[in-house]
Image (spheres, helix red, strand yellow):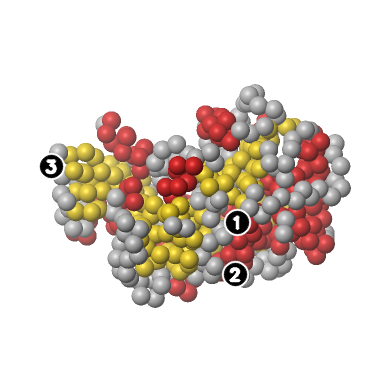
Amino acid sequence: MQISTLISRSARYFKDQICLTEGNRDVSFNEFDRLTNAVGNALIASGLEPGDRVGVLLPNSIDCLVAYYALAKAGLVRVGMNTRETVANHHYKLEDSGARAVIHCQSSGFPVEININEADFTLMLTHSDDGCCSIDRSLDAPLRLGYTGGTTGQAKAVTLTTRGELAEMSAFLMDLVPDLEPQSSFLHAAPIAHASGAFFLPALVRGVRSIVMKKFDPAAFILLAQDSQATHTFLVPTMLAMILEEPSLDDAQLAFKKISYGASPIAPSLLERSEKQFGRIFAQCYGQAESPMVITFLAPEDHDRVGACGRPFSFVDCAVFDENDLPLGDGEIGEIVCRGPQTMAYYWNRAEATEKVFRNGWLHTGDLGYRDEDGFYYLVDRKNDMLISGGYNVYPREVEDVLMAYDGVLEAAVVGLPDEKWGDRIHAAVAVRDPETFDLDALLSYAKANLANYKKPKSIEVWEDLPKSAANKILRRLVKERLMES
């Protein structure tokens, strides 16, 4: 099965129904098939060959999705890029992947003189043959390179295959969003270059209209959701917190039937506020770049299990291992591992790193957690982020959840600073609703009352905002660097 087959099949099934909406522009399923053919044929005609890597540097847009799936049809390998990243990030990814071309646009705000062969996307759309474009590739050959978040160091390219892409799509339709149907509509507010893009293919094959929001803004999101009567969306917790703070939400008439979330853990207090506002319609997906979006899922009806990230997707196998790669029992904290057709094939040009993360057939996630007797998994923290203070293990996420439960705290990041006596001295930075009136001493007292002595922060700073990656993940390492400089 090729991706191109899914696109042409949807064109045949859903014809002139709306596939994509962006602002005042609509594209039907038939037109999406023709556009991806046109760009795919132009790419081949330009001299690119199957297996060549091509970067796509476009903002959330119909054109971005056309580019993605034109590459799939043409047998080319997409290099994941994000307009929120720096030019240095872009150069690194293009050079690391050995990309021969990059599809971009002037409006992205970045220079076009990237030192590789360039492709003119506009020219492709207007001067190309829109006849069938479908280059068969092995299900296990590279389809796209997705880069790790680089939260702990240099980003690595994970090699994702057609087999993995089809597995991810199937997992969504079986477990996460089985309620997608032609009458549904999916609002893409998060970056398509990141997690939100994973929902497009499931929507496409079910005849669902995808509504593309070029740039996220909480007030604009609420207005667009109301005007379009979108039934589904995907948000990261940071976006959800911003929406809940937007005054216009109180009077909005929204039609969401399911809100999926992921990319980073959600604080119990934020989830409680979200369910109070929208109802019990939240579905969590836990994954990582090496196993995109698909390790475990938590259905709406299971959200009374506070802190759980869910059970494994239907065809994913999970376990918890100790430091010697031996399985642990229920309730014991160790590293979460998984295996299944959704995982990456390997790290691009990094054989040693691949061998380190794949051991005995299991993908080692680097996430610490445990499983309960009912088979639900719970994330504790990143293995590399665990702190040791006075000989005790301290998981930053646990401390962050307590801080975020305090009224007025919107975000929190907890890190350990070097200390000769304690090893790691616990410190925190928070972003708050109203910095001018916020009582920091009261927050310190709250933390002291709700955390064990060795877990409570020695100090807390109020920042205007916390540093985040292009995927809206809080970067603790940058918080630590700033605290150490102060």
Q: Amino acid at mark 3?
A: Lys
- Quickly name the residue at label 1: 164
Give me the residue at 34% from left, 51% from top: 383
Mark nearer the N terminus (2 vs 3): 2
The relative height of residue 376 versus residue 476 in the rendered view (above or below) is below
Give me the C-alpha separation between circle 2 and circle 1: 15 Å
> Looking at the image, which residue is at 49% across and 61% down?
339
Type of the residue with mark 1 = Gly
* Circle 3 Cα neighbour tier, 10 Å, few/some/many (<14 / 14–19 / ≥20): few
Residue 274, can we see it?
no
Tell me if residue 89 can be seen: yes
Mark 1 to mark 3 CA distance (whole Å)? 48 Å
Horizontal and vertical percent position of residue 141:
64, 49
Which corner quadrant of the image does residue 152 belong to? top left
Q: Where is mark 2, residue-wise?
A: 174
Determine the residue positioned at 51% across, 65% down: 316
Q: Position of residue 427 (x, y in %)?
A: 25, 44
Label 2 to label 3: alpha-carbon separation: 52 Å
Answer whether labels 1 and 3 touch (C-beta < 8 Å).
Answer: no
Mark closer to the observer (2, 1): 1
What's the residue at 17%, 51% (across, down)? 391
Quadrant holding the C terminus = top left
Q: Is 43 on the left-hand or right-hand side of 97?
A: right
**Quadrant of the rendering where the N terminus is positioned:** bottom right
The circle on residue 421 is: 3
Q: Secondary structure at mark 1?
A: helix
Mark 2 is on which residue type? Met
Tag 2–tag 3 contact (CB < 8 Å): no
